[in-house]
Image (cartoon, coloured by chain):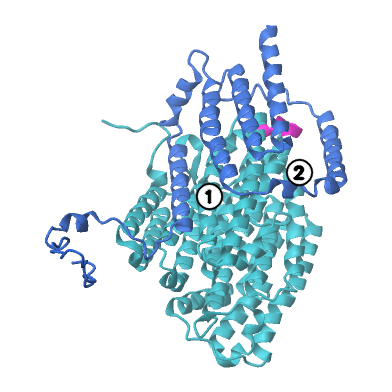
Amino acid sequence: MILPALFFYLFAGVCIAAAVMVIASRNPVHSVLFLILTFFNAAALFVLLGAEFLALIVLVVYVGAVAVLFLFVVMMLDVDFAALRSGFLNYLPVGLLVAGIFLAELLLVGGGWIISPHAAKTITAPIPGDITNTEAIGRVLYTRYIHYFQYSGLILLVAMVGAIVLTMRHRVNVKRQDIGTQNARSKRNTMELRKVASGQGLEELPPREAAE
Amino acid sequence: MSFAIAGYSLHPVLPELVLAVGTLVLLLVGAFRGERSTTLVGALALVLLVVTGVLVATLPAGRLVTFGGSFIVDDYARFLKILALIASAVTLLMSADYLGQRRIFEYVVLVLLSTIGMMVLISAGDLISLYLGLEMMSFALYVVAASNRDNLKSTESGLKYYVLGSLSSGMLLYGASLIYGFTGTVEFAGIAVAAREAGIGLIFGLVFLLAGLCFKVSAVPFHMWTPDVYEGAPTPVTAFFASAPKVAAMAIFVRVVLTAFPDVTLQWQQIVVFVSIASMALGSVAAIGQRNIKRMLAYSSIGHMGFALVGLAAGTAEGAQGVVLYLSIYVAMTLGSFAVILAMKRKGLATEEISDFAGLSRTNPVLAFFFAMLMFSLAGIPPLAGFFAKFYVFLAAIKAGLFTLSVIGVVTSVVGAFYYLNIVKVMYFDQPVGAVDPVRVELRTVLAVSGIFNILFFAYPGPLVSAATAAAKSLF
């Protein structure tokens, strides 16, 4: 039984170390890569807890989508992180003071904290023991929790409409491909054959109507 | 073949379903017909909101519960849903001018989506519905705040609201997860049972949950976004912010506190009393120095939310009735005031400074009269509706023995009267600064209805008061 505990400390330790490196590393790209490492370790912790569905979701959503998005943003935006950091040492004493106060408060509160002994008893919907938790979620997601699913769908719709409202611009003076016009072109109104006398060239062509 | 599952009847959610499907249809209409369909979409949206309101009113009486307890339709939900629907419909009506200029049909769709969120929120019976409803409402609000996207102030207000809103959602979720962890359930009824023997962990969760909700009703100390967002957002959007979302957020605030934590009254009462006093004090003092009328009304709304929370602090059915009445009258006053602000145009340009109201009594006496009445009502001067709103919440607070809170409330109300009366003074005694444009017919209608409601409420308060009483009783 010591093995899960060892793995817990391994993953938790790497997770925290990587999280520290996210804020400590100088290169923002390294920060994002450390963030991905943090996510991987968090996923491993979920596996240890027996929540394999959550673990895979963390990998797919955070590593697959969010972290890659971060990476894109960091690489595409020209943020001068050195300038952002320049006042760091000046503000350090004040920051340490605030952090110290928070730490003291946390210790005071945490010192008197006893996790309610009733908490474990009151759990009303425990995961059934004989099925995997992916199956457990699958059983309720589209039945018992159908309304949550629909609400989430509407929220995503809001996000989509919002993104379009805020960013899409109908540009004028942009040449767009118009397949209909392209197909309607014929040899007669696009080509012209002329005889060119040797050594003379052509005089300027008369401007043709734009959309014949 | 029947697909019915016990406890999952769709009948109670019929209004929401109609509204949601109608919104999707309007989105399609707008997407296919392009921006010239803005007026059409707006008109159809008004019809849709009215139909939804009728459906809410005609649901079978009594307490309907569906989706395994996470969606509750009781008298309280019915009353506040209709109030929120009225507020949304009136703001859409008042947006006609803005929509005519900007031609964004998505604005209408977003307002409707936000309204669906509000209805989900008002009916929420557990923490997950609460969170989803709140986010549906807020996301749409972030976008409409920035909908005038070429304007720096509008985008600033949208971004500010979004960033601070995410922060508050984070706190709310943290609180919700603590509550779930210490009670083992997300349903309000289950939390109420488990809360009887819960310790400090649950109280921690409660504090975070209330912090998130305070942000949404813009109560001090989570009010910082309000003045900037109100000032920066386009005026019809500000009118929307000040009315419908406040109703929905306050509705869920009251429902969570009274139905999920009835046995830890002492703990949440402290928080609500503090927030209430701070909001009333800040709302009445900080508004004095404002020059911009929208900013002033932002502080005014902070103060009014403080007054409404006085009723909640009482923790009784009477207090809840006070909150419900306060919200109804507040919405009527706010919508009327914003109708005036929208009407204050000179040569087609909107004016937003308080000094622009100078001498309005001579250039447009009707507008000035109604605005003066609304200001008196907001200040809480009898016999206008605003006085009765305050009367009911303070009565409940005194009956619950909260004397200090009541005295502070009355004092801040007197301080706050200064800036409302200042506007009346500017309108009636200062030199005119030029005539205002003719007022659009929909603004005149809104203003007349709101003004007459405020002036004549004392003559016939019966129906509203008894409806509010029934609404409050259904929570207990």
Which chain contains the residue that carries disc 1?
A: B
Circle 2 Cα neighbour tier, 10 Å, few/some/many (<14 / 14–19 / ≥20): few
The amino acid at mark 1 is Ile
Residue B387 appears in the figure: no
Q: Which residues are magenta?
A: B193-201
Which chain contains the residue that carries disc 2?
A: B
B405 relative to B350, above or below? above
The amino acid at mark 2 is Leu
Instruction: Determine which residue is flagged by label 2.
Output: B266
Circle 1 Cα neighbour tier, 10 Å, few/some/many (<14 / 14–19 / ≥20): many
Residue B399 appears in the figure: yes
The spot of residue A59 in percent (x, y) is 54, 27
The spot of residue B368 in percent (x, y) is 58, 85
- Name which quarter of the figure residue B304 lies in: bottom right
Numbered label attached to residue B11: none
Letter of the cyan chain: B
Numbered label attached to residue B122: 1
Prevailing secondary structure class for the magenta stretch in the rendered image: helix
Relative placement, left or right, of B365 versus B21 is right
Real-space Cα distance between discs 2 and 1? 24 Å
Letter of the blue chain: A
